Amino acid sequence: MQPLRLGDTGSAVAQVRAMLATIGLLNNTAPASADTFDDATELAVRHFQQRRGISVDGTVGRETFAALTGAHWKLGDRPLAHEAGQPLFGDDVAELQTQLMELGFTLSRADGVFGLSTAAALRSFQRDYGLIADGICGLDTLRALRQLGRRVVGGRPQLLRDQIAVADSGPNLLGKRIVLDAGHGGSDGGVVVDGIREADLVWELTSRLQGRLSALGVQTWSTRGPHNGATDEARAQLANEVGADLLLSIHIDGSASPRANGIAAYYYGAGESSSTIGERLADLAQRELVARTGMLDCRIHGKTWSLLRLTRMPTVRVELGYLSAAEDRSKLLDPLFRDTMAEGLLVAVQRLYLPFGDDPTTGVMRIPAAAH
């Protein structure tokens, strides 16, 4: 779809305004502005994007429109079931997933997408409650859900399960399965400054990290080659198909302001729904990179971007500085500096699997040169 922004008019704008009104973010009673993207509409869109972990720009693009479409569904409005090729999504699915997780059934997170894991958790609940285990959330299943309370109290049950799963996998990286995603690619160069393309720099840096991981016995996959790109949906599908333990997505940022600089990391998170291990890995990566590079700490953030939302494993996106900032660009162009960044990411992955008692201080752990 064509992005909708301030000043646009038409039926698509009217649809967006109606959805914003449905979720209580816009007063849509004035007929004169019903199909106009005015200041009030832009403010409502910004509020919605901030609430949903979408990049806040006041523009309704594909991701914002999809999130708006799913936001008006409440649990019980429609039957829910897995549909191959076109899974249902929406707030009602996220509410169902949250209830199943609180009752102790295994789901990676409440991402609002009714996939195979959600169907399996729902069937398990139905069997336990003596219902027909058809994986369809209809009236009988809703009634049963409303009659039950939490089985796990005193914390986030999924956090406990995730921590146990990581601990059980052991501290050795040998045999771990990691997908590396170099951002953009092909005709999409990402941020481009003075002929320097983000896509080329992150491919080179990702290749350095892949070599280090492979030397330690990690099975690695790349979501693209050096001269091609892929959609976020295709990248997520690859990671899901290979059964990856982690996905690291590597980008470099850009801004109209040359003063914008620094490193940031992102994980799946929106409100109370988040990837607990993704958040932990994002924090480790952010701290290691800042400590080793001395670059500005722009902190970690929960987002619902497609790649973070559609992957079934912990996924972290790192923005390794701003190509538009002279101070960051000069560092990023240095191969030795990129090697330092690759080591920081490698150490973050290793620390994720170490027991808390063995976890070293940030910035001090080194991978022996012989292991490269």
Image: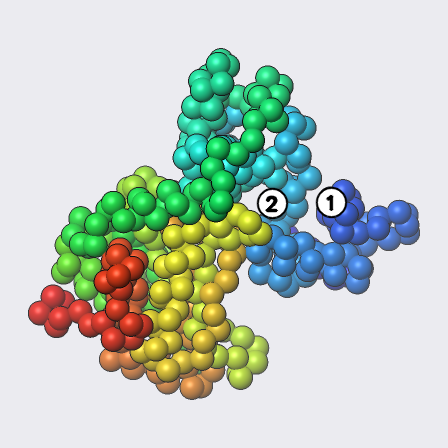
Indicate the quadrant containing the C terminus: top left, top right, bottom left or bottom right: bottom left
Residue at 45% across / 76% down in the picture?
Answer: 297
Relative vertical location of residue 163 with respect to residue 142 in this rendering, above or below: below
Q: Position of residue 367 (x, y in %)?
A: 17, 69
| Amino acid type, mark 1 | Ile
Q: Is residue 353 left or right of residue 85?
A: left
Residue at 44% across / 29% down in the picture?
Answer: 121
Return the residue at label 1: 23
Relative vertical location of residue 190 with respect to residue 64 in this rendering, above or below: below
Circle 2 SS class: helix
Give the spatial CA distance, label 2 vs label 1.
14 Å
Relative vertical location of residue 111 with respect to residue 37 in this rendering, above or below: above
In terms of sequence position, does the residue under pointer 2 or pointer 1 come before the other?
1
Return the residue at label 2: 66
Closer to us: 159 or 312: 159
Q: Is residue 340 left or right of residue 134?
A: left
What number is the disc on residue 198?
Answer: none
| Amino acid type, mark 2 | Ala
Relative vertical location of residue 286 with respect to residue 216 in this rendering, above or below: below
